[in-house]
Amino acid sequence: ANYQPVILYFYHSDKKNYLAKACSKLNGSVFVDKEVVKQSKKFLCLAADFRYLHKSLRIQFKVKIVPTVIFTDSFSNVLYTLRGGRQTPPTFAKFMVKARKGNEKAVNEYKKKMADLEEQFQKADTLLDEGNFEDARGILEKMTKNKMNADIAEGAQARLGEIKMGELFNEGVKALEEKNFDLALVRLKGVAESEIENRWASRAWDLSRTIPAAKLYGKALAEVEAGKNYEAMQLLQRVSMMEDAGHYASLA
């Protein structure tokens, strides 16, 4: 969370084992040095007994002998590996400084890439608001494959699902404009009642509620064309007083 570099120290605790002597030397000379102790506060320091070290970790960090000291950046990338107990305090302290610089470089690169990802995410969101689904989809599909941040990948996947709702919403609006009310109702309710959270849900719900008024308004216009003005007047009055008529009330 704090982007600290890490020191992994693998040792042998069995004093009867010949490897333990080198570990004891490291413990008694290097790890008690004032400068090393001071520098260590800027690291996450972890130690593990070689006797109980899981085989997978031995393979991952290539720990064949002890003592082994591994410096990693905050993303678990190995920076330096020191084997054996011949290290002196000044040499060890130099590696600590170099490891901190290596970690700082890795963190800066990570933050830059994260800023770029977040900028792309915001761009995709803007494109969604504008209804430009094709360009938004192109950005989001790439973002789902990013391995740097699982939250962004998951968010991008959710936005791809939201695009489907946006396309469905547009189909509903088009059907409404073409007076295909049954299709419009199916599409708009599909968006409004979808389990996928989407920015069109409330608008789809509001539009779906105006469909009865839209049907009645269309029927009134047909009566006008047929010369049945009295019947048209009655229908238009009903539309104007409907609670969920939306803009059809003012048209009526």
Image (spheres, helix red, strand yellow):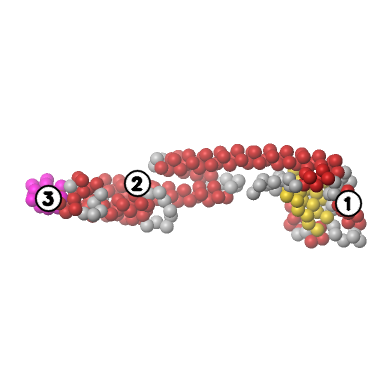
Magenta segment boundaries in residue numbering: 221-236
Gap between marks 3 and 2 measured at Cα: 30 Å
Q: Which x, y percent locates residue 137?
A: 46, 43
Asked whether, in this view, residue 241 is left or right of residue 59, the answer is left
Residue at which label 1 appears:
28
Q: In which quarter of the image is residue 185?
A: bottom left
Q: Which of 236 and 133 is in front in this view?
A: 236
* Contact flag, marks 3 and 2 (Cβ < 8 Å): no
Do callouts 3 and 1 mark residues in contact (Cβ within 8 Å)?
no
Q: How many labels does the image show?
A: 3
In terms of secondary structure, what is the magenta stretch mainly? helix
Q: Which mark is residue 175?
A: none
Q: Is residue 208 left or right of residue 167?
A: left
Q: Is mark 2 on a helix, strand or loop?
A: helix
Residue 103 forms part of the magenta stretch: no
Secondary structure category for the residue under label 1 = helix
Dot in front, 2 or 1 = 1
Q: Which of marks 3 and 2 is nearer the N terminus?
A: 2
* Labels 3, 2: front one: 3
Answer yes or no: is residue 227 visible.
Answer: yes
Q: Which amino acid does label 3 sit on?
A: Ala
According to the picture, the residue beneath numbered tag 2 turns out to be 170
